[in-house]
Image (cartoon, helix red, strand yellow):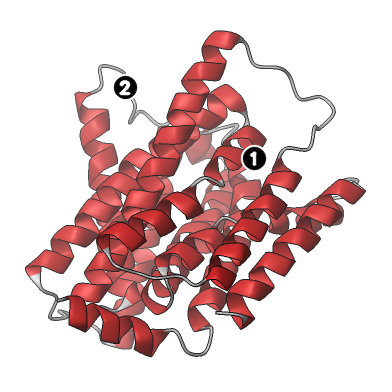
Amino acid sequence: MQIIFNNFLNSSLINGQGEVAALAAAGLWAVASVVYGLVGQHIPPIQLNLIKGVIAIALLLLTIAIGGEWLPQIPALSICLLFLSGAVGIGWGDTAFLAAINYLGARRVLLLGTLSPPITAIAATIFLDEQLNVSAWCGILLTILGVAWVVTERVPGNSEVDSAHLWQGIGFGLLATITNSAGSIFSRAAFANASISPLWAAVLRLSAGVLTILVWAWFSRRRQMAFPYPYWQSRRIILASFFAAFCGTYLGIWLQQTAIKLTSVGIASTLLQTSPLFVIPIAITLGEKVSLRAIAGVGIAIAGIGLLFYLK
């Protein structure tokens, strides 16, 4: 199996398609995060997570039907790995991520998320025998520093977090980071074990994530599946939910799986964490002021991305 994986890895690290897919996914997640921030004021996180998953699965299956990719021959091991990846990375990871945001706010949680690329790269080295050269590690470090420099900037109006909520938020944030890394590793192992379309990989992962959310809600004593009244009465909220699910979940996870398939999982994880950089031009478009520190952070991250592209 190791020989097969090494041949697969060497043949896919050629023209930077995986890196481009990862950056595109990060950009789409940035757009979706802005919309989710608005929609989230009307829909609780667990329902929003379920809505985006169901919409994305329907769109992916429609795409598969149009492309005629029905009933692919996927080994049972790869199916299990993708289901495990979705349950851990989407079901548990997204839930922990949303909970961490409630305690810490988005910027602090995004800072914790910068731990994901080195964790993923180290895990891939141990479990998948993926070897990154010095230039790649330097690129990962520069990209993480640039993103962290942007995310840690103090924003006027941000409230401080009390001690109890701080440690709860850090716990959820670290859980989200670890599960995100584990999900990426499981996906990469599934791709190494067989030739799988990123479309089907996304469907299997999302299906496992949605099932995990449903099981969690079923056993919860709260009525997590009761949708609030305004949701079904507001066409704008419904359209915004669909748009965010289309960009961030349907296209985003499809591109994520493409990136994990076509490049080293450590590099893919690093580039997938660059969403905060794409939020900056969105903020400028919306009329917000962007500091020189944020622009400098973008420059550092772009230098790191350049290393990942050109000095592998």
Q: Nearer the viewer, residue 26 or 33?
A: 26
Q: Position of residue 79 (x, y in %)?
A: 16, 64
Task: Report x, y in % for residue 271.
Answer: 56, 64
Q: Which mark is residue 229?
A: none
Q: Is residue 12 left or right of residue 290?
A: left
In the displayed structure, does residue 191 sit left or right of residue 29?
Answer: left
Closer-to-camera residue (65/106): 106
Label 2 neighbour load within 10 Å: few <14, some 14-19, many 20+: few
Taking the image as shown, residue 278 lies to the left or right of residue 228, namely right
Q: Residue at x 51, y 18 (%)?
A: 167
Q: Quadrant of the C terminus?
A: bottom right
Mark 2, secondary structure of its residue: loop
Q: What residue lies at 56% left-to-right and 53% top-to-bottom?
A: 239
Quadrant of the rendered structure where residue 61 is?
Answer: bottom left
Q: Quadrant of residue 162 in the image?
A: top right
Residues at circles 1 and 2 in contact by the CB criterion of under 8 Å: no
Secondary structure state at the residue bearing disc 1 = helix
- Looking at this view, is 263 or 131 the one in front? 131
Name the spot of residue 99 as percent of width and height, x first. 47, 29
Q: Quadrant of residue 75?
A: bottom left
Q: Earlier in the sequence, mark 1 or mark 2?
A: 1
Amino acid at dot 1: Leu
Q: Which residue is pictured at 43% across the width and 76% down the height?
A: 263
Say which residue label 1 marks. 38
- Identify the residue position indicated by label 2 in the image: 223
